[in-house]
Image: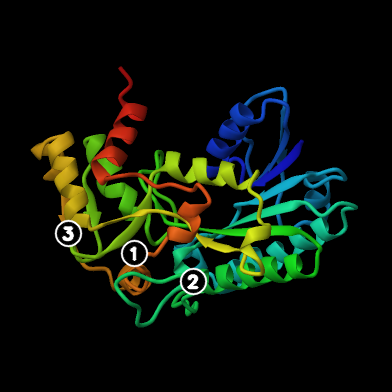
Amino acid sequence: MNITVTGGAGFLGSRLIAALLKAKPEARIISLDRGACPVTHDNVTSMTGSIDDAADVARAIPAGTDIVYHLAAVLSGQSEQEFDTGLHINVDATRLILERCRALAQPPRVIFTSSLAVFGGEMPQIVPQGWATRPASSYGVGKAIGELLVSEYTRKGFIDGLTCRLPTICVRAGQPNSAASSFVSGIIREPVAGVASDCPVPLDTRLWISSPDAAVANLALAADLDLEGLGADRVLDMPGITVTPAAMLDSLHRLVGAAARDLVTQSSDPRIIDIVCSWPGAFDDSRARALGFASDTDFDGVVQQYLKEVQPA
């Protein structure tokens, strides 16, 4: 089996590659990213390049490719500030990847990671299946267009596509990134390290989140699913849990201590609020769960997962 992962050097992409190696030890995996993939293995080829370069894409998706995971993207904060860059990478480069897949003799499975940012405007407390997309950010618009492209290329028989709308991933190890939701990890990650952090949205903001482990397990599962039963609707809202920053900080207090909780302040950043507070706080994810996708059970477990990673016994 031959697999390509765009964004394979990133936080989620590299974890996905490691998970795929365990699940499919015979697989040959190509990572395409601007940096080297941190997963070193005889079956992993790390390609340094860009998804908007046709030659790089052609080398990363050679003849015989069975599965393409398209994770690479310009994130929400940068997309909002750099409109042309966001549109070029999130839309134009996505089409370039789909065109390369279309050129293959055998249509590959293409798993596209989208976002709850495709939603906006007035929404119910729990967003039902099939709710119309109405993004309120440039990032959300780019992802919504990507979803439509994946569905159309699937309808035409060029690919066997599936869009996985991911929750906000928490807790992301490493440094803050350009995502408007970066604070969701930051209000846990930084205090655990003894560093002050700030929450730029109201503490009662409802957030739909997933731990890295749950998100990666769901993406890995998508490689082997029989998608025929989905019909023409190849978009799935991935399972998650609903939390608020207040509840997250309560978990931090319980599991790490009052000193860590006291390192987090609360402010108001209209730029972040306009983006993050336009996203849904809960979904009816029963369609995805019926296929075997799963979520974390509670936020304490998410924090414990992160603590185990950064503070191993």
Q: CA distance from mark 3 to mark 1?
A: 23 Å
| Residue 214 falls in image quadrant | top left
Mark 2 sits on what residue?
118
Q: CA distance from mark 3 to mark 2?
A: 27 Å
Tag 2–tag 1 contact (CB < 8 Å): no
Q: Residue at x 73, y 26 (%)?
A: 26
Closer-to-camera residue (8/80): 8
Looking at the rendered image, the quarter that the N terminus falls into is top right
Q: Position of residue 11 (x, y in %)?
A: 50, 42
Mark 2 packing: few (<14 Cα in 10 Å), some, or many (20+)? Answer: many
Q: Secondary structure at mark 2?
A: helix
Q: CA distance from mark 2 to mark 1?
A: 14 Å
Mark 3 sits on what residue?
266
For marks 2 and 1 on the same chain, the one whose residue lies earlier in the sequence:
2
Labelled disc at residue 282? 1
Task: Please name the amino acid that badge 3 sits on.
Answer: Gln
On the picture, is 93 further left or further right than 126? right
